[in-house]
Amino acid sequence: MAEGRKKEFIIHRKNEYYDRTQKLVPRMPVENNRVMQLENEVWQQIPKTRSAWVYPFIRKPSITGSNTYIIRSGRHLLVIDPGAITDQMEKVREILSKEVSDQNHRIILIAGHIHVDHMYFGLVDRQLRRIGRTIIAAEHWGAEQLEAGDAHWTGSDIVGLPQSPVHVALHLLTPEDKAAEIKKIVNIEGFGEIILNSHQVSTNGRTLYGQSMLLEDGDYITFWNTPGHSQESMSISIGTLLHVGDIPFATNPGIAGRAGWNKSDLLDSIYNIRDHLLTEDTICCPGHGRTFDYSGAMAMVSRMEKEISVMPDISEYNVKRLNLSLWHGLDLIDEAHRLFPIIAGRMMSLCFRLENIEMEQEAADICVLFSDEQVDQFLLDFNRFYEEFKAGKKIKPEVVHKALQVFEQIEKAFPAESLESVIDRSLLRRARRILSDFLSTIQGIIPDGKDEPVMLISMIHEVFAGEQSGVSDEELITIADDEEAYRQAIVKRIAHHPYAHHLPYHISTENYEVDEDAITILADRERLYDSFIALIEYLECINAKSLNITLTGEKNGIHMILTPVGPNLESELPLPGSTIREIAYAGGVVESVMEPGKEDIRIEFQKSANFDNSG
């Protein structure tokens, strides 16, 4: 900082100072000489620098905007990730305007990476150009994508924002920069001279490339090549500050798989950050949310290492996957609205029956296992969020992210293990799959159930019979002298009393020359069993009074035709999308659903290899 500027800051007390507006503000909090947090929207001197200051805009994590960090050193004003939030950009302009006294101030908009939630306003906001001499800086490959206006690599196609080509004056970490440790001087017309020093360090076969920029007061800001979240991702260090961008979130659903994401590169980058960039006084500045210290950074590295080790191969999260995730999420929210009231109703019924046989304590214990009110609130919150989306106030990625949050909240609130003794397993499996199936969709992985022979007609009979309790009369007699064991067995027997569906059904076959019980298909039996229960629930909802099931053998597989019978069928009620997907995951294909003039459901299954007896 120039001598005149230094005098404008007067140290007042040990941990406070006056800024140029004579407002008393705190320094960064220090504990045992370690910086613990950055104060939001306050200028703070950066430890271990000559005279560099930081002004952070720290936002709650979201997918539509990012944190912004303004670094001041002499006449240099560096804006790391300008973000994509209107009110935040207005504040950034305001801060920069106060700092710039003439056109000699040089503003550099730095892309930690080029995703639009971090850089959109830096790319399109022309007002910034009028504050001072302003250029954009980015890692070389990312700079090329910005100059090409590539909507895919910036992710603007996903959020529906326009992406125009933009000039990037300063290309960092070019192939030439990585080839050797060199010093180079870049002259930018109308901006001036920039001095860059390239260097690299290697450990265990991994090389970390860095490039330092000399600032006016003698401090350096260093850009580190840390790909993985995206191909052009950089970590940025100055003094004790280390900007790590979106690396801490790079394994999260909906983040993993974004354009440029690479699991191997990400693992190398977190190791390089751990081995070369973290020290005990480091304060990590993420792209979203609160800053964290060295211990938090080491915990982040450990967590991500474990998550990467078990991650499947994830396909690219593009517009197609976004749309699929959105509609699957909506289907599963709809399924949750149906499923959890059924579970709550089963529990109320069980408690009522126990109270009728004077087992009040057991009834009371069961009643407190699960309250559907909390789940109802989660789902209602999503409904309100979705209404905002339909009103144009939210975008598709936000809806997908909100659905994921809701499913995670439900998973935490739903005591599936505690309910295993009082709720049939099929219902619990369906509830548990809500999150896992949605995660698979976001990751671009179609759930692949077990491909095993299933005796189809036998399974259908089993579904209609309902789940058995597993507590026989003989067992009750055997444990009658043990009051506690006897009462537990009674609860289990009543709880798992077959919830037989009262829908009469008839099965017929066509084109078969073998015993119908030998008809086998290839499917995931557990998923198919559960999806067939969902089909029956649907048929009951449309007022079916009975059901005809026809199985026909064709060259291309086995066809199941479900024909509901009843005088007042509500065929306009659509078959739930979640049920259609569950059947597909089980190994079937829904070929047609209920519609006027064709009031049946047709499903095709693949024949088992040991069954090929169609006529």
Image (cartoon, helix red, strand yellow):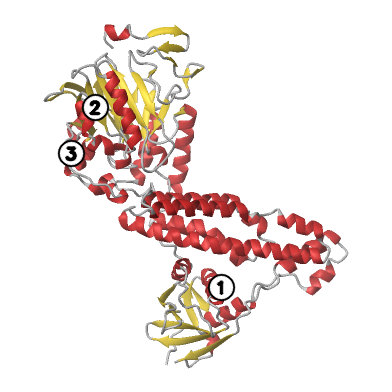
Residue labelled with disc 2: 108
Residue 375 appears in the picture as rendered = yes
Q: Position of residue 322 (x, y in %)?
A: 35, 55
Q: Nearer the viewer, residue 385 or 174?
A: 385
Q: Are marks 3 and 1 in contact (CB under 8 Å)?
A: no
Q: Residue at x 18, y 22 (%)?
A: 194
State the image quarter where residue 137 is shown: top left
Q: Secondary structure at mark 1?
A: helix
Please state which amino acid type lies under the numbered disc 2: Ile
In which quadrant is the N terminus drawn?
Answer: top left
Q: Is residue 155 left or right of residue 482?
A: left
User: Which of the 4 image quadrants contains residue 112?
Assistant: top left
Residue 500: % across, % down: 65, 76
Image position, residue 613 (x, y; %): 44, 89
Crowd around label 2: few <14 · some 14–19 · many ≥20 (10 Å): many
Q: Residue at x 40, y 49 (%)?
A: 398
- Inspect this view and state whether residue 173 appears: no
Considering every residue shown, the one lying at the far front of the view is 391
Q: Which mark is residue 166?
A: 3
Q: Quadrant of the C terminus?
A: bottom left
Badge 3: few (under 14), some or many (20 or more) residues near its Cα, within 10 Å? Answer: some
Above or below: residue 68 compared with residue 304: above
Q: Label 2: state its secondary structure.
A: strand
Mark pair 3, 1: CA separation: 56 Å
Q: Position of residue 162 (x, y in %)?
A: 24, 47
Q: Which residue is mark 1?
A: 537
Mark 3 belongs to which amino acid?
Val
